[in-house]
Image (cartoon, rainbow, N blue to C red):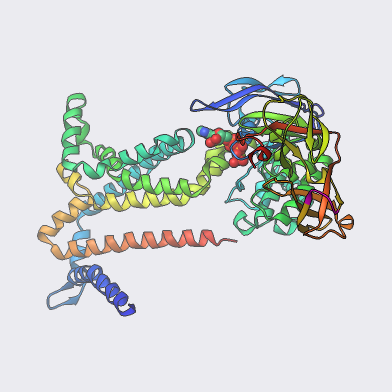
Amino acid sequence: MKTLRVTVLLLAAVFFAAPLVASAAFGFSLPGQGFTFEPLQRATGNPAFWQQVGRSVLLAVLTAVIGSVLLMGTLLWLHLRARTLLPLAEGLSVLPFVVPPVALVMGVNLVFRAIYPGFLTSLLSLVPFYVVLTMPLVYRALDSGIRAIDLRTLVDAGTSLGAGRLRLFWEILLPNLRPALLAGGLICVAMVLGEFVLASLLLHNTYPVFLAQVGQDNPRAAAALAFLTLAGTWLLLAGFARTLRSERTRS
Amino acid sequence: MTTDARLALEQVTKAFDGRTVLEDISLQLEPGELLTLLGPSGCGKTTALRIIAGFERPDSGRVMLGGREITAVPAHRRSMGVVFQAYSLFPHMTALTNVAYGLKIRRQAKPARLGRAGELLELMGLSEHAHKYPHQLSGGQQQRVALARALAVAPEVLLLDEPLSALDAQVRVQLREEIRRIQRETGTTTIMVTHDQEEALTIADRVAVMRDGLIQQLGAPAELYRQPANAFVSRFLGTVNLVPVTGDGTRIALFGQAVETVGQHDPKVPLRAHIRPEDIELSIDEAGPGMVSTVLLRGATTSIGVIWDDLVTPVRVDLPTREAGGIESGQRVRLGVRVPHVLVEPDPAATGSQKTHA
Ligand SMILES: Nc1ncnc2c1ncn2[C@@H]1O[C@H](COP(=O)(O)OP(=O)(O)OP(=O)(O)O)[C@@H](O)[C@H]1O
Ligand SMILES: [Mg+2]
């Protein structure tokens, strides 16, 4: 039994780690030269690189903020005022998984080109798409955060002590929902930094699009960057898990 | 505290999804009074409390405080302290900051409010736990902090929704006495919800017994216990023997003795009498119609099970333990009634009394 478990674990580790190790090895070496940063430096030396990283970070932050605000508002309202609608909302929240991005773009394009032709040419036009795309996961992160606290009782307790709505939200709910909001934000960052289809369909130069282009003529740099991006995301997640753990055992 | 915290519900009704939960509830509390709201699960106790606190609006009727109607006043502007059935402390604040929170909202300066919160925690015997977070406190400690938090803002009315139901028996008794003491000291008009009849009777000035959204009886604990208005109240407050009998309209024959009933009854329907174990007299008699089946020492009282005639369930008789000395199972006994009036109700076992059945 135990050997089986260990075998499965090892197989999984190899399955996930092998491509990573391979891409790192490929990205940080040149034939005959061994370990080197040269391909990476060539890519980051390109002024377009930092510009596109900046764009993707901007998109990620906007997506996280707008998505969280919209979903948090909706979810709090549903939990406090319309619990019977929760299953319906949960069902609706996974729709973006079902609708392919191409269909989404085509639909939005049809509508918006008629109303506001300039819409899709702005970089920020990606934000609504990303909010929709990240919704299923952010919804789950926030919903489980809300379910983990006794929302009704906390709201009633605060109210009976004289707290109005704003105070309730800032001083009582937000501190207790912060882990869920952070998790939702991280999901947004991870998804936006990896989203290629929509950005390239709409002809916007974001970081993933840049990566794909670099891959055409400097595949080693692309591999190195992909590795760094993944490792960075993991570090973020690990840091997040640590803050949570230390918060739970504080004082 | 405010002097005129006279609280009243006037003909309050409330329905959820078309199902009536409160039906025409009226009650009035004198300033400084402690009323317990007693009833089985789901009878509407919490709903009544939530309406008073302002968390719910009644469908009709009014909530009055000190002669002013407050039905439409939002919950955060009412001066009411609430302790909830569930643990309700703010998880991200220490015991001390939890208690001080209401004063913070009232813009009291930090040193003043923390000082006051510290005093209240001391009153609850929790000084050394002041800087702990809720998850580091036991259930009883959490409810004490919740009580201190509710009292910190010197509310006109204190609403306690089964604050002790999650605690074990010993802590419960101790804490309910503390609640009573502090309530007396502060003179805060208080409603406490419970479904524990002993708790309701011990600490209340008056008790309201509820069933299915209706108040069945409202009065002093002794009055409810001795003179229950109906069979439900009688059975809900303590143990009662239900004995099938027949009557002639004003009297019944019980244990071979004619006893007057509370009010009149229909002589044509089978009845059952409600009689408490301590209201039955027991004497040893070789030729008595009853036979002792069990003797159970409970402490100060001893419960004796008596098989009487052809009743299916033994009659329970409670005697002070020192009077129950010589009684053993198998003995023949005679029973009698110690009270002048006995409550009767139509026997729901529609086959009629067990006597005719046998
Ligand atoms: N928000 C609500 N929506 C729908 N029904 C409700 C709501 N709140 C209470 N009810 C119903 O109203 C009835 C009375 O509920 P309430 O909570 O007042 O009972 P209770 O006497 O406090 O019971 P318990 O002793 O179990 O706490 C119950 O049948 C409950 O299902
Ligand atoms: Mg309740």
Residue B130 is drawn in which quadrant?
Answer: bottom right
Q: Nearer the viewer, residue B228 or A205?
A: B228
The residue most toward the right is: B322
Left or right, B82 with respect to A80, comes to: right
Q: Residue A120: image x %, image y %?
A: 20, 35
Q: Quadrant of ligand 1?
A: top right
Q: Nearer the viewer, residue A228 or B345?
A: B345
Q: Residue A189: image x %, image y %?
A: 32, 51
Which quadrant of the rendered structure holds the C terminus of chain A?
bottom right
Left or right, A28 with respect to B36, comes to: left
Which quadrant of the rendered structure holds the N terminus of chain A?
bottom left
Measured along the vertical axis of the image, is residue A237 above or below residue A27?
above
**Which region shows up in magenta?**
B286-290
Q: Residue B195: image x %, image y %?
A: 67, 42
Predominant SS of the magenta segment: loop
Instruction: Give me the residue at 68% from left, 51% from top.
Output: B96
Instruction: Give me the residue at 31% from left, 45% from top.
Output: A136
